[in-house]
């Protein structure tokens, strides 16, 4: 069973034979200056905010949103794949906060009888870059998080957590450092050796071939996103015919928003996930 949703939020439509149990609302404890907020738990997952150590001249503060799940359960990346619900973060009620940027560690694909989804199992930390309005004063983060955890059934969850960040506080959190290291690094297409081309413009859903530098046989996952959240492109699949020293994937230009010409020119974002590293490449499909 899966929850089908766009990345824009809104009503969750349920597909499959199993019912989704009602939305679980998790309320956090009061904010406190610490290295982490208390865990806010339900039966299948738990959420907390964590603080990281900061350099004295840093323009932003390091923090993270951590989700842990029961064995066999998973949650979703910013683009969930064939189905699912991406996490939605809100810090609108925080104190002394100008902006918060959420970062997404490299995900993995999970395939079952319902299709292929993209996300994380067991535990994930979403790093945060918090820009205070006044760096000389503490920041109180107030998180409202909407997400879903799934195994054979899916549970939409609403969680709230609070944590006060101090420029001079925060732990040298090894788990946060590891999550930051797994955030895909943006590189030019030329550096990644990546090219994307249509193979058959004569069809209503053109086939796109993508090849990039990667040794043959190296485990690689490739994900593609369109210019906006309304796009729901298929997950690329490995394809034969790559040049030496490259790997090739293909996907149909399906899942485009209404009115978009599949033969038009637009920017695509590719995420290449290898063992121990991940890169993000933006390129135009002309």
Image: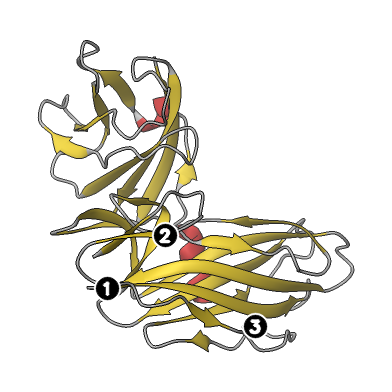
Q: Residue drawn at (15%, 39%), measured in percent from left and top?
A: 216
The answer to whether the residue labelled 3 contacts the one labelled 2, judged by CB atoms less than 8 Å apart, is no
Label drawn at residue 12: 2
Q: On the picture, is 157 further left or further right than 249?
A: right
Rendering coords of residue 270 (x, y %): 38, 37
Of all residues, the one furthest to the top in this rendering is 202
- Choose between 97 and 16: the one closer to the eye: 16
- Choose between 21 and 201: the one closer to the eye: 21
Residue under pointer 3: 35
SS label for mark 1: loop
Ranked by sequence position, the earlier of labels 2 and 1 is 2
Asked if one can make out residue 215 in the rendered structure from this viewpoint, the answer is no
- Choose between 6 and 233: the one closer to the eye: 6
Ranked by sequence position, the earlier of labels 3 and 1 is 3
For marks 2 and 1, give the one nearer the viewer. 2
Rendering coords of residue 213 (x, y %): 28, 33
Q: On the picture, is 1 further left or further right than 170?
A: left
- Choose between 261 and 209: the one closer to the eye: 261
Residue under pointer 1: 153
Rendering coords of residue 170 (x, y %): 68, 78
Rendering coords of residue 169 (x, y %): 74, 78
Label drawn at residue 45: none
Q: Is residue 171 above or below residue 268?
A: below
Location of residue 268 (image quadrant): top left
Ranked by sequence position, the earlier of labels 3 and 2 is 2
SS label for mark 3: loop
> Around disc 3, counting alpha carbons within 10 Å, would you say few (fewer than 14), some (14 to 19), or many (20 or more)?
many
Asked if one can make out residue 242 in the rendered structure from this viewpoint, the answer is yes
Q: Residue drawn at (18%, 57%), measured in percent from left and top?
A: 114
SS label for mark 2: loop
């Amino acid at each position: 069973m899966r929850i089908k949703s766009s990345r824009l939020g809104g009503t969750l439509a349920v597909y499959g034979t199993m019912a989704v149990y009602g939305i679980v609302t998790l309320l956090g404890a009061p904010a406190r200056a610490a290295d982490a907020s208390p865990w806010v738990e339900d039966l299948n997952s738990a959420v907390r905010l964590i603080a990281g150590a900061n350099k004295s001249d840093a323009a932003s503060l390091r923090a993270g949103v951590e989700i842990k799940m029961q064995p066999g359960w998973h949650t979703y990346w910013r683009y969930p794949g064939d189905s699912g619900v991406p996490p939605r973060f809100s810090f609108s009620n925080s104190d002394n906060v100008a902006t918060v940027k959420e970062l997404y560690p490299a995900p993995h694909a999970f395939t079952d009888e319902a299709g292929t989804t993209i996300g994380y199992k067991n535990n994930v930390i979403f790093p945060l870059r918090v820009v205070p309005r006044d760096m000389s004063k503490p920041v109180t983060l107030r998180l409202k998080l909407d997400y879903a955890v799934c195994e054979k059934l899916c549970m939409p969850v609403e969680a709230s957590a609070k944590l006060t960040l101090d420029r001079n506080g925060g732990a040298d959190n090894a788990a946060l450092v590891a999550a930051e290291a797994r955030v895909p690094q943006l590189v030019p297409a030329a550096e990644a050796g990546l090219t994307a081309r249509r193979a058959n413009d004569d069809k209503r859903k053109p086939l796109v071939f993508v090849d990039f530098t990667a040794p043959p046989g190296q485990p690689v996952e490739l994900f593609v996103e369109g210019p906006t959240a309304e796009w729901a492109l298929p997950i690329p699949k490995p394809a034969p015919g790559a040049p030496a020293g490259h790997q090739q994937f293909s996907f149909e230009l399906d899942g485009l928003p209404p009115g978009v010409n599949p033969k038009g020119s637009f920017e695509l974002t590719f995420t290449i996930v290898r063992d121990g590293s991940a890169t993000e490449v933006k390129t135009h499909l002309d």
